Image (cartoon, rainbow, N blue to C red):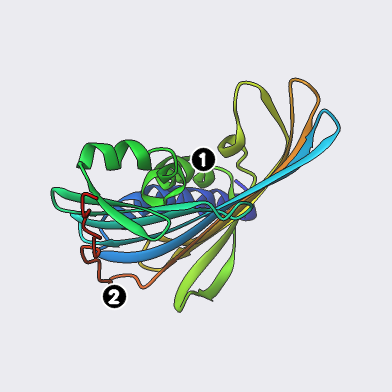
């Protein structure tokens, strides 16, 4: 076997293992903050269309989590805090206690972009389509930079991905500290568009505090 090919095969195998182990590394973190943005531009029936969603979240242990969602086009937003068996939801500036089941149902529409939800599937695909670039400092920690041609993150039954690429930065401790994916696609009606998905992870195992929000009592008037 050619020495260069052997080294290449070893590098691919090593990246596969690293990405597979990264799922457990992320799940094992005690606390962290994250920011993820999903945006798209395109045309529907010849008319331009675009949208951007920003999600900010924090984890302070298995029973303390916070997430806020914002439509960057309309400024519409809401937030959810969960502490143990209690949950609160914010619309505008007002926090309201809600059953944890309600909080889960409401958050399902956006937590698909949270690293704890999205990374396990991403890691499987990126690990087999990645190329090692080098080591960089990302969000204050040493990280290994990989480029990827993984496209399934954008796949759906009525969309054909024409071009997709991504970059992932893996902290030396094993968890993803940053990723960025872009794609160009066309749907079954011929509408073209592009999408961008980014995630930044920070304050890993740092002093992340999540407290119960101040609730405005209903006067009953």
Q: Position of residue 108 (x, y in %)?
A: 38, 38
- Where is 48 relative to 26, above or below? above
- The one nearer the camera, 141 or 116, is 116
Q: Position of residue 55 (x, y in %)?
A: 47, 55
On the rendered image, what quadrant is the N terminus found in? top right
Residue drawn at x 22%, y 66% as measured from the top left: 211
Residue designated by label 1: 125
Is 68 on the left or on the right of 193, as rendered?
Answer: left
User: In the image as oriented, which residue stretches furthest toward the left?
Assistant: 85
- Where is 18 relative to 203, above or below? above
Residue designated by label 2: 206
- Mark 2 / mark 1, whichever is N-terminal: 1
Residue drawn at x 86%, y 32% as measured from the top left: 46
Q: Nearer the viewer, mark 2 or mark 1?
A: 2
User: In the image as oriented, which residue stretches furthest toward the front?
Assistant: 221
Is 186 on the left or on the right of 132, as rendered?
Answer: right
- Where is 181 relative to 48, above or below? below
């Amino acid at each position: 076997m050619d020495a260069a090919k052997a080294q290449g095969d070893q590098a691919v195998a090593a990246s596969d293992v690293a990405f597979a182990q990264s799922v457990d590394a992320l799940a094992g973190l005690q606390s962290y903050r994250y920011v993820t943005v999903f945006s798209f531009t395109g045309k529907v029936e010849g008319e331009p269309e675009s949208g951007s969603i920003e999600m900010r979240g924090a984890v302070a242990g298995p029973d303390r989590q916070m997430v806020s969602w914002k439509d960057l086009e309309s400024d519409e937003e809401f937030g959810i805090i969960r502490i143990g068996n209690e949950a609160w939801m914010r619309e505008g500036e007002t926090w309201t206690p809600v059953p944890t089941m309600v909080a889960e149902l409401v958050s399902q529409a956006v937590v698909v972009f949270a690293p704890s939800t999205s990374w396990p599937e991403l890691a499987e695909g990126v690990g087999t389509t990645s190329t090692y670039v080098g080591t960089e400092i990302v969000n204050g920690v040493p990280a290994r930079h990989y480029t990827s041609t993984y496209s399934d993150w954008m796949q759906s039954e009525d969309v054909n991905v024409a071009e997709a690429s991504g970059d992932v930065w893996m902290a030396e401790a094993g968890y993803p500290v940053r990723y960025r994916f872009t794609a160009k696609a066309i749907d079954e009606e011929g509408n073209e568009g592009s999408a961008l998905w980014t995630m930044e992870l920070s304050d890993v195992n740092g002093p992340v505090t999540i407290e119960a929000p101040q609730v405005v009592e209903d006067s009953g008037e």
